Structure formats: C-alpha cells, structure tokens
Image (spheres, rainbow, N blue to C red):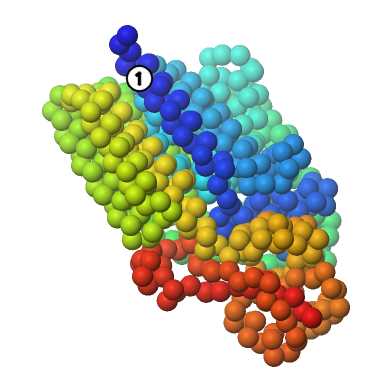
Amino acid sequence: MKITENQLYLLLIILVTIVSTAALFGDLMEPDGALYATIAKTMVLKNDWINLYLRGTDWLDKPHLTFWLAAASYKIFGISAFAYKLPSFLAGLLGCWHLYLFTKAIYDQKTALISVLIYSTALHLIISSFDVRAETYITTFVIASIYHYYKAQQRSFWHIIAGSFFAACAVMIKGIFVLIPVFAGFLIYWAVSKQYRELLKPKWWIALVLILIFISPELYTLYVQFDLHPEKTVFGQQGVSGLKFFFWDSQFGRFFNNGPIKGKGDVSFFLHTTLWAFLPWSILFYTAIAQLVKKKNRDQIPMEGIIIWASALVSFVIFSFSKFQLPHYILLIFPQFSILTAAYLCRLESKGLKVFFGIQNVLFLIITAMLSSIALLFRVPSPFLCIGSLLLLLILAFVLFKGTSVQTIMARSTLLSISLMGFLYLFFYPALLEYQAGMKAGKWLQEQHPGTQPKILMNASDAFDFYAPGEIGYLSGYEELKKEKSDKSMVVYIPESEFSVLKTIYNTKILKSFDYFRITRLKPKFLNYHTRNQVIERFYLVKIL
C-alpha cells in the first residue's frame, strides 16, 4: 500500500523520536550538564527545594525550574543520568507538538509536519538531546507560549492562561529575556497589520500579570536564599540581591557586559554558528531568509507569518549584539527557523528543487565521509560496525527515496540526521566519555567503595560530584585536608599535578587512575589516536594511610 506524503513525514518523525531515545541512556557531560544534574542531586539529598548549592556553597546563576524538574525525576526514578535527561526529552516532544499546532494554524498540515521534522533533526537539537542543559526546556516553553497567545487573539481566555503559564516556565528556566521572542513577533505583527488596538485589550495586560503570578515561586526562593541573607558572599561580595540578579544582572548585565558574569561578543558569531548548528538544513534556511528580501516572496507568506520571522529576527539581533554568547543560545529560535525553512521548501518549484536536491545529496556524502574518517582516526569502539551503519543508511536513503521532490529531500536529509544520531549517541560520545575522568572515578567509587566519603582536593569536577556516592566534600588546600585526614573512610580525587605534592606530605595509596581531557574542547591531537597521549592528563583516587 502506497503511503501519502504526509504519512511519510509522520513516519519519519516517529523514526527520529525512537532513535532519539538512545540519548537518554548516555552519561552526562561536563561542564553544564553535569553541573545542573549535580545541583538537582544536592537538592534531593538535602531535601531542600528552595536553596541552590554547588560545591557546598550558595549558587546564583540560573533560575530553579530546570533543577526542580530534574529533582522531581530523581524522586521517581532515582538519581541517575537517565532521570536527569528524561524531563528534557519529554519537554522536547511537547515542543514538537506545539510547533506542529502553531505551524498548522498559520499554514497547513504538510508544512507543519515538515517543520517538526526539520526541527527535530537539526544538529544542535541532536547534540542537546544528549548533552542536556536548559535550552530544550526554554525552546519548548517559548514556542508553546507563542502558540497559545496566537490562539488567544480570537479564542477563549484559556489560551491566555496557558500562554502565560508557558511563558512563566521559560522565565523560570532562563530569565526575563525569553519574553522577547515570545512577544516581539506579536508587537511587530500588530504594528504592520495596523492592529494597534490589540495593545489596549485587557487580556494582554492580564497575561503579564499572570506571568508575574506564575513566576512567584522563583521570586520567593531567590528572596529567601539571598535577599534575606545579605551576609552571604556571592560573586566575591556581600549584600547580593537574588531578585536584582534575576531581573537585571543575569540578563541585562550579560547583554551590556557590566554584570558579575561577563563575556566577549562577536556580531557575526550566530551567523556562522547557525551554519553548522542547523545542519542539514542551514543552506535551505539561509536561502529562505534571502528570498524574503523580494516582495513577491513575502506576499506568498500569510500575514500571520510575520509573528514567526519577526520573533526570530529580533531574537537573533539581540543574541548577536550581546556581549555574552554561547552556541546553544541559538536553539531558542530553531522552531521559527524550521517553520521558515519548511514554508520555503513547500513553495519551491522544479528548478529550485533540483538545486537543493543536489546540495542535500552532496551534504549526505560529505558528512558520511567525515564521520567515517573520525571513526577511524579516533578509534571509536567497533569502528567498522560504525562505518558500516553509516554506509548502510546512505545506501538505503538513495535506494528507497528517488526522484527530485520535497519528499526525497526530506527523507534523505532525515536519514542523514539519523546517521548523525547513531554516530554520536552510540559510538562517538561513549568513546569521548572514557576521558571524562570525574565521571569514571565517581562510577568506580560507587561500584567498588560505596561507603567512602569522597573529597576533591584543589580542583572541581561536577561529573565526579554527580556520580560519586553521597555528597562530595571540596578541599581548597592542604590545611583543610589536614583536618580531615583522620577520617579513614575518606577517598581523595586529585589531579596528577597535586598528587606529586601530596605524596611528599602524606603516605598515600593510589586506588585507581583515570585519563582526562576536556572533551567539550576537542583538538586534533586528541582526536588522533596516535597523538592522544600527548594531551591526556591524569587524575587519581587516593587513600591517605
């Protein structure tokens, strides 16, 4: 029985979802994933859902919701990498559903299915499904809020409540800046379509009040942990207000680079980041944006489409001019990117289809060759099984899906993304994590010496903190160690550079050594199996006798 075009897209979405579940069973990566998981672990161990702690001290950076969701999952499934990742995975599915509803409301079912397929197979979402931070949550809550506010223009007041709830959730994940992609599109749409009276309607002002009400748990916890305790030292100073940080320093302070957390901005950063992060769709996306310059192309877009591209444009500009930039920020507007790309793809005529048909095929060949080369050069486990799987998917893509059509472009590009998922989740990331010493040491300690009291000397490792048994103690120097050394249950996690000093002071016994490399900053010498030992560091688990 021949399936319809829409049925093909739905089957591909289901296939992508199934393959994506492999990311749930991988370990956590430093720095952010392991850090967030550790904060949530501490929340559960202390049974304290108000105060955020990291390495034994008060922590003020991100709002609470990411940690509440992870901690709730720990309560149900136990403290594990799976339990940490599961809420984010489910949130991703919720985001895909709202992206479908929103796109279908403005365009049609075909465009909606294609937009979901594009979003769920974009490279940075694939990466974020394994290396879970907060971005999947934010992206989901923003697109859900936009959808419900869109419906609230004509429908029931329930959509105002739902839109405000999701907007508040986004704020409690990242901060108030996320309201910009939520509302910017509507404000520009109302201005262009001359619907100025929308601004005077009580429901939108009620929406703002509802957001404030819904974020009150976050405001309360910040007030209790910080504003009630000006004696606490945060960012090297006392009298730090959690509420001020939430409303100003964490957002505007980073944008203007005058807050406690600083960075270096580059206006072109997200232009070239999108080029790789939105693969295999980035060339199509940039072409779709370029085509919006022509008035005849803009005329083919429904007026409500302004909400989509205006939201993306304003956010992109703000990201680009911010002084604090990280690649995963761009994920926040991937749903808008996906809708714009899907809508353009559905409008493509024969000549344009042939061009992109060729481009996507070449991308498939190049990326398959690159991944195969990395598998050999890095020496992932079972490299020939890895390469064989990549080649099999390549052959299936070209044998099963033929002809110059949107269906073929979508199917082959989806199988390319599935190749990337399989390569990363099953081969590359597990091989990389062998060099995350803190994780390996924590797991070994949990299995071999679960009753010990783990300490970290003169270093920090959130992966060790998460995987090691119980709460971890941090020793900033040898004076602190001297006070603790009588504890016979203590095991110290220490870098090789410090161990050379420690063994001259105390009689020590090495329990186990672990190879270390900062795997989020890959270098050619590390990727090359033959030169890897030149850049590997070593950490030890040590008993003081």
Residue shown at 44%/61% (left/top)?
265
Label 1: which residue?
8
Residue 309 in sight in this render: no
Query: Residue at (64%, 18%) from the top-left corner?
Result: 158
Q: Is residue 418 visible?
A: yes
Could you say where residue 130 lies in the image, as x and y percent from the top left? Answer: 52, 46
* The C terminus - image quarter: bottom right
Residue 245 x %, y %: 67, 55
- Could you say where residue 389 lies in the image, as x and y percent from the top left? 35, 41
Q: Nearer the viewer, residue 235 or 55?
A: 55
Q: Quadrant of residue 262?
A: bottom right
Residue 379 percent across, percent down from the top left: 38, 59
Query: Residue at horizontal 46%, vertical 41%?
Result: 125
Query: Is 482 left, or right, of 285 in this rendering?
Result: right
> Quadrant location of residue 437?
bottom right
Q: Which residue lies furthest to the top in this view?
A: 1
Relative to 488, residue 286 above or below: above
Q: In this view, does 247 lie to the left or right of 182?
A: right
**SS of the residue at dot 1?**
helix
Q: Residue at x 42, y 42 (%)?
A: 422
User: Mark 1, residues whose alpha carbon is within 10 Å: few (<14), some, or many (≥20)?
Assistant: some
Q: In which quarter of the image is residue 38?
A: bottom right
- Residue 247 higher or lower than 3, as above or below: below
Tag 1: residue type? Leu
Q: Is residue 303 left or right of residue 45?
A: left
